[in-house]
């Protein structure tokens, strides 16, 4: 008779989880991990938001100058 070693894999989205990945993660840890994995996209999004904020400040300043005239 043959004996087989049974390996139980916890599959999530088609990939086997390793020992330290098995434990539950908090939402903030998941978000932080995604940010660290996608540095280029995070940089582009943060720069875009920064430029939008600067643009709003400059436009509101310009409108205030026009109101004074």
Image (cartoon, rainbow, N blue to C red):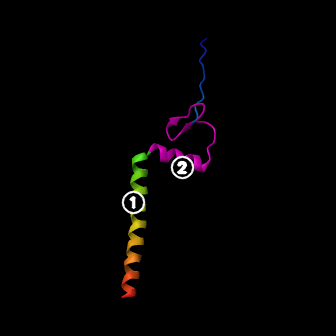
- The mark found on residue 48 in the picture is 1
- Mark 1 Cα shell of 10 Å, populated few (<14), some (14-19), many (≥20): few
Left-right relation of 41 to 17: left
Left-right relation of 16 to 48: right
* Residue 5 vs residue 38, the one in the foreground: 38
Return the residue at label 2.
31
- The answer to whether residue 36 is above or below residue 2 is below
Which of the 4 quarters of the picture holds residue 18?
top right
- The answer to whether residue 62 is above or below residue 37 is below
Q: Is residue 34 magenta?
A: yes
- Tell which residue pokes out farthest to the front in this image: 69
- The mark found on residue 59 in the picture is none
Of tags 2 and 1, which is closer to the observer? 1
Question: Could you say whether the residue bearing mark 1 is in a helix, strand or loop?
Answer: helix
Q: Which residues are magenta?
A: 11-37
* Residue 67 vs residue 11, the one in the foreground: 67
* Quadrant that contains the C terminus: bottom left
Q: Earlier in the sequence, mark 2 or mark 1?
A: 2
Question: Could you say whether the residue bearing mark 2 is in a helix, strand or loop?
Answer: helix
Residue 16 at x, y percent in the picture: 53, 33
Q: Is residue 63 magenta?
A: no
* Residue 24 vs residue 54, the one in the foreground: 54
Residue 56 at x, y percent in the picture: 41, 71
């Amino acid at each position: 008779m043959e004996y087989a070693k049974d390996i139980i894999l916890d599959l999530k989205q088609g990939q086997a989880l390793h020992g330290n990945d098995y434990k539950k993660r908090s939402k903030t840890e998941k978000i932080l991990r995604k940010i660290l994995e996608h540095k280029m996209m995070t940089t582009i999004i943060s720069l875009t938001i920064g430029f939008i904020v600067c643009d709003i400040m400059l436009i509101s300043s310009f409108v205030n100058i026009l109101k004074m005239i």
